[in-house]
């Protein structure tokens, strides 16, 4: 049953299996295991970014396509949900059609980019996607009457998904059972479902053909596969998943703006997560997103504690000062690439640890 649920793509490493189970259980019970606003916010971001990074791995790792437009699709999904909720009110109908509209628009954009650009060499396609994503970000910033410009959009979501709604008055394990908890589990279960759908896609005949196209496009074309069609389809599927991840972020934050969805910094973070976890392994998205977001969130706090503990040693205290957390994050990334050139999942599977 578990093998069928995982589409036959098991972790193939006891250590990897243990890590994935720890992450799954931690996310499933995060509000109870790690109470506190910051912990739950971090867990929700991890869920959303697992979907986002996995959708990019579907494009980069399984199809061999380098795109810089992924945050554009992420933003389209977020803005689709935000506009639906801000214009028609905080109803479930608006929530559903906003998510559907965002995914649909992202699919159309991806189809247009794919059909017009995937016939060119990889580097030119990457440049085209970068130009399109940059133009889209500028457009969103300029259309303040529609998108809120640089300030973004604030909106209401259904009351049952807000902290004001109480499912029961009593606390369970010292946790309030309110709308915020329901919103977290909406994000969690939708993220799990989307991840399993992508796992099914990459382990289907379609997914195996994508790998053949990635490994040798000329050979795949020679034996009868329409390479452009497969690449375009993969681009569209990846865009739809990214848009749905954006919708989840919009629901969770109740705010959508260029900085939270469209920035180049987010695109770079996605690339780092894919490389750290391991390209061409959706499980790599789970590990990469979890490690990267935990480092982003808690590394500065850990360095602050280390700086205080080493205050008697001036040089060490200066090196681990909290304001240098980005430097150490970069060093950690370099070390991970050096010691895990195929990503964490690739290394664990090779070692069968």
Image (cartoon, helix red, strand yellow):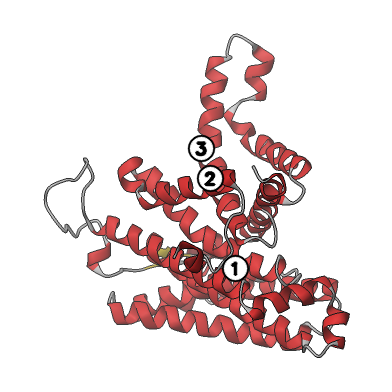
Is residue 78 visible from the viewing direction of this image?
yes
Q: Nearer the viewer, residue 11 or 169?
A: 11
Which of marks 3 and 2 precedes in the sequence? 2
250 to the left or right of 291: left
Label 1 packing within 10 angstroms: few (<14), some (14-19), many (20+): many
Task: Kindly report the distance in space between the C-alpha atoms of the residues bearing marks 2 and 3.
Answer: 19 Å
**In terms of sequence position, does the residue under pointer 3 or pointer 1 come before the other?**
1
> Nearer the N terminus, badge 2 or badge 1?
2
* Residue occupied by mark 2: 19
Residue 66, image x, y percentages? 75, 68
**Taking 139 as reference, is 190 left or right?**
left
Where residue 55 is drawn, which disc sits there?
1
Left-right relation of 42 to 158: right
Q: What SS does tag 1 mark?
A: helix
Q: What SS does tag 3 mark?
A: helix
Q: Is residue 262 visible?
A: no
Task: State the count of labels.
Answer: 3
Between residues 248 and 228, which one lies in front from this camera angle?
Answer: 228
Q: Residue at x 59, y 68 (%)?
A: 55
Residue 103 higher or lower than 8, as above or below: below
Q: Which residue is mark 3?
A: 298
Q: Residue at x 74, y 72 (%)?
A: 211
Q: Is residue 63 left or right of residue 2?
A: right
């Amino acid at each position: 049953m578990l093998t069928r649920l995982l589409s036959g793509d098991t972790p193939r490493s006891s250590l990897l299996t243990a890590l994935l189970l720890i992450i799954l259980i931690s996310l499933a019970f995060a509000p109870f295991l790690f109470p506190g606003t910051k912990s739950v916010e971090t867990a929700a971001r991890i869920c959303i970014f697992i979907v986002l990074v996995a959708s990019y791995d579907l494009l980069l790792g399984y199809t061999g396509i380098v795109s810089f437009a992924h945050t554009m699709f992420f933003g389209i999904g977020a803005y689709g949900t935000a506009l639906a909720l801000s214009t028609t009110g905080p109803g479930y109908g608006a929530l559903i059609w906003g998510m559907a509209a965002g995914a649909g628009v992202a699919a159309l954009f991806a189809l247009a980019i794919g059909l017009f650009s995937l016939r060119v060499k990889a580097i030119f396609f990457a440049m085209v996607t970068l130009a399109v994503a940059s133009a889209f970000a500028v457009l969103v910033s300029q259309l303040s009457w529609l998108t809120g410009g640089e300030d973004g959009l604030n909106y209401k979501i259904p009351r049952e998904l807000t902290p004001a709604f109480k499912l029961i008055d009593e606390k369970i394990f010292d946790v309030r059972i309110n709308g915020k908890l329901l919103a977290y589990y909406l994000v969690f279960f939708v993220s799990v479902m989307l991840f399993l759908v992508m796992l099914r896609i990459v382990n289907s005949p379609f997914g195996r053909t994508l790998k053949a196209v990635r490994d040798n496009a000329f050979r795949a074309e020679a034996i009868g596969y329409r390479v452009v069609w497969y690449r375009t389809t993969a681009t569209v599927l990846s865009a739809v998943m990214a848009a749905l991840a954006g919708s989840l972020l919009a629901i969770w934050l109740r705010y959508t703006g260029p900085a939270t969805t469209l920035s180049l910094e987010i695109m770079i973070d996605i690339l780092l997560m894919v490389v750290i976890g391991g390209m061409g392994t959706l499980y790599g998205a789970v590990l990469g997103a979890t490690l990267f977001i935990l480092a982003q969130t808690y590394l500065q706090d850990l360095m602050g504690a280390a700086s205080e503990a080493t205050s008697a040693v001036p040089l060490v205290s200066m090196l681990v000062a909290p304001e240098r957390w980005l430097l150490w994050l970069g060093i950690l990334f370099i070390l991970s690439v050096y010691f895990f050139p195929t990503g964490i999942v690739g290394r664990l599977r090779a070692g069968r640890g």
